[in-house]
Image (cartoon, grey):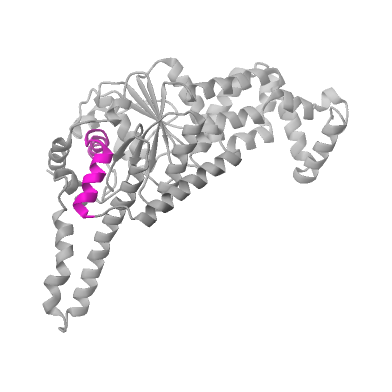
Amino acid sequence: MRARRHNAIVARARGRRPVKQLLRKGSILVLLGPGGVGKTTIAAALGLAAARASLETVVITLDPARRLRDALGLERLSARPARLDPRRLRAAGLDPALQLSAMVLDSKRVWDGLVARLVKTPAARQRMLDNSFYQSLTEQFAGAEAYAALEQLYDLHNGNGFAVEIVDTPPAAHAFEFIQAPAHLIRLLDSRAARWLFIPYAAAGKSVLGIANRAARFVVGQLEQFAGIRTLSAISEFFGAAAEAADSISDRFRKVDALLHSPAVTFVLVTTAEEDRLREARALVDQMETEGLRLGAIVLNRLLDEATFDALVAAPGRAPAHLAAISRMRATLAPLRGRDTADTSDALVSFLEGYGAHQRAAIERATRFARDLPARIELAAAPEIAAGVRDLATLAKVATIVIEAGAGRTFLERAAAALGVTPSPATAAAAHKTKKSSGKHRATR
């Protein structure tokens, strides 16, 4: 009953559907965003939306929350694409013929597979896999997990097995780390730089690292003091084992990097409406523009609670009845002042007024953010799902909202008008100052 009511609400809001335009044959959607914003849920929802558009789709995710795996019906999600069970699709009121698969990232498996393909000599391959520097590189190096996701995407895309590929990126302190991962690895493993510093023992004929020249000896001497001779020995052995495939590995990194910058890839940023999250999102927009990367859409997730969101979609420009009632409640309860229940009534009214203020503040911040956003970037919004995404029916609801509920800017402007909120001049000025500061920082890096 509740699902039918929501579908009717969304149906009345349909019009321009900008995010849906990103779901087309041959497209790759890469979702960026910090941890804790619901990125995996939005990735799965977009995957379901693409499958409902008759496109065979795969979602590459990290180890998702148990609740989401249960919702997909893929409790044994593995590193190979697994198709959603038609029986679960039918039970959720969806077409059982939908072609949606999901897989979980296995970073170690991806890296070891890369070594197996590119290092041809069995002895060198095994030395590399056993090397402590290689193990640290693939498990702890910033961007190693991000690169593994891109490597998996590269193989899937070139296999031509899916019409749409959606990547849920690893959480990172800075979302841009995902984009920069291949370039970081190219610089780190550049064979010429490595050969200049490190020569394996066998080639050097010394009891310690062979050093190419006096300048390199000084550099490595400083590194020994910092990292220890054992660490540098492992690095030397790693580059020795990788020597035969060094150029092939670097070439592979460059091909993956080229795919990431190709016209097939569109980035989707998922964020929430907290002030710090919106500042991060604005900085990322500027950074991607500088790098020449295509940010196709931003999803403002968990913007409002379901009741407020649904009411604003159903009656654009009109304040939700429950929020309007809260604004009248203090006057209504005024005759109770001085009675035994006065303290309880005041506490209840204060709590509800705080709730209403929280909803209005979220719309104020989101509207200000949307007004400052370049027009070419599409915007969508989704509510906080009270019970969480526990089944396919709820995931389908999120997909419908993001894809069908119209342009996010229009929704926000109407919501702001309905709630009587506008970005304050002081807040807007602060946002502009932050934007200028971000640009200045990029220019001086």
Q: Is residue 381 left or right of residue 268?
A: left
205 above or below 220?
Answer: above
Q: Residue at x 58, y 20 (%)?
A: 252
Of residues 419 and 347, which is closer to you in this image? Answer: 419
Q: Is residue 294 left or right of residue 394?
A: right
Q: Is residue 334 left or right of residue 359?
A: left
152 above or below 342?
Answer: above
355 above or below 444?
Answer: below
Magenta span dominant secondary structure? helix
**Residue 409 lies in the magenta-colored region:** yes
Q: Give residue 92's position: percent from left, percent from top.
A: 20, 35
Of residues 138 and 442, which is closer to you in this image? Answer: 442
Residue 416 appears anywhere in the view = yes
Q: Quadrant of residue 332?
A: bottom left
Q: Give residue 69's position: percent from left, percent from top.
A: 35, 38
> Looking at the figure, which quarter contains the C terminus?
top right
Q: Give residue 308's position: percent from left, percent from top.
A: 21, 51
Q: Residue at x 37, y 22 (%)?
A: 27
**Residue 269 lies in the magenta-colored region:** no
Span colored in magenta = 392-420
Q: Give residue 401's position: percent from left, percent from top.
A: 24, 38
Of residues 307 and 144, which is closer to you in this image? Answer: 307
Q: Residue at x 60, y 41 (%)?
A: 444
387 above or below 294?
Answer: below
